[in-house]
Amino acid sequence: MSLNTQLIRSLQAPARPVWEEPPSKAGLTAKSGFLLLCCLGVLGPLWIVIVTSLSPKRVIDQAGGLVVIPKGLTFVNYSELLGGGQVSRAIMVSVGVTFFGTLFSMTVSVLGAYGLSRPGSLGHRFFLMIMMATMFFGAGLIPTYLLVQSLGLTDTYLSLVLPSAVSVFNLLVLRAFFMGISPELTESARIDGASDLRILLTIIMPLSRAVLAVISLFYAVGYWSAWFNASIYLSDQDMMPLQNVLIQLVQKHTEAPTGLQQAVRTGQLSPLGLQMAVMVLALIPVAVASPFVQRHFKKGMLTGAIKG
């Protein structure tokens, strides 16, 4: 190809933006270095927490605090925490609240999203506007507390579920996804005599597994990580979930959970090691569940947002 021909083609071709050009070696190196620093910033503290939780008391005392390089690992902190007492009871409370809370929230959200996704449903636009308004205007903490108190929900596990049972954002994502499903499927099922409940259970939900998995993870993480409701609605320490016990450990770092004070006083366990072990226990469920739901994020969130 002659030089003139190349020059003519380069003049005829429109100039591409800078971000569409292939990256240079220097650019790739800079991006790789930046991503490496981000990974170290995330994994470094996690490594320190895990190693400290697995280190015996003498190693933690020699390090003067957090342990970076492991020198003899032990599971004594975890065995003592899971052997009974306040922490093991708090784990059971968190597991129960997360399971039943997620189940209840998903049931209400799916039913509400299906009703709001049907254009001919009674008052669906009015209720949709009311629910969207709650995303911008809240009743406030004091009216909410007075409502929970007047319903007799204080010092009950229902106070950890009902005040935050439905997220309007999650409901709108489900609604958008349901509206993206071909209406011909539901109309043909309705002609065959299927009720709305049957259509929801046999057609809508099987086609919405991706978004249901993502929203379930959102609710589960929310319930597992929640601490504020328990701090204002519960007064019984035996009913506290794991996150509240963790906060108490961090704020009162010289004290040990109920059932472990004697081991700390005698020098068998380190309070810092117990704190790190509780942190790891709080992270395990989210770390285990996230990879299984990760593949649904793109389809579940982006498809629902675009088709709505």
Image: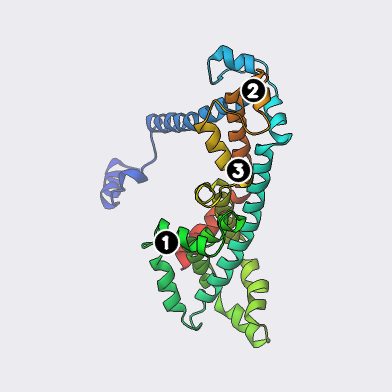
Q: Is residue 201 above or below residue 166?
A: below
Residue kind at label 3, given as amino acid type = Gln
The chosen color scheme is rainbow
Q: Is residue 162 above or below residue 255?
A: below
Q: Which residue is mark 2?
A: 264
Q: CA gap, disc 3 to disc 1?
A: 25 Å
Quadrant location of the N terminus? Answer: top left
- Please name the residue shown 64% across and 43% down the image: 90
Residue kind at label 1, given as amino acid type = Pro
Q: Which residue is mark 3?
A: 237
Residues 301 and 287: in front is: 287
Task: State the SS at label 1.
Answer: helix
Task: State the SS at label 3.
Answer: helix
Q: Is residue 94 above or below residue 139?
A: above
- Say which label, 1 or 2, has the lower sequence index: 1
- Disc 2 crowd rating (10 Å Cα; few below 14, some 14-19, many 20+) is some
- Say which label, 3 or 1, has the lower sequence index: 1
Residues 286 and 16: in front is: 286
Picture coordinates of residue 228, whole percent (x, y): 49, 48
Q: Which residue is mark 1?
A: 143
Residue kind at label 2, given as amino acid type = Val
**Quadrant housing residue 296:** bottom right
Q: Is residue 9 left or right of residue 90?
A: left
The answer to whether one can see residue 181 in this image is: no
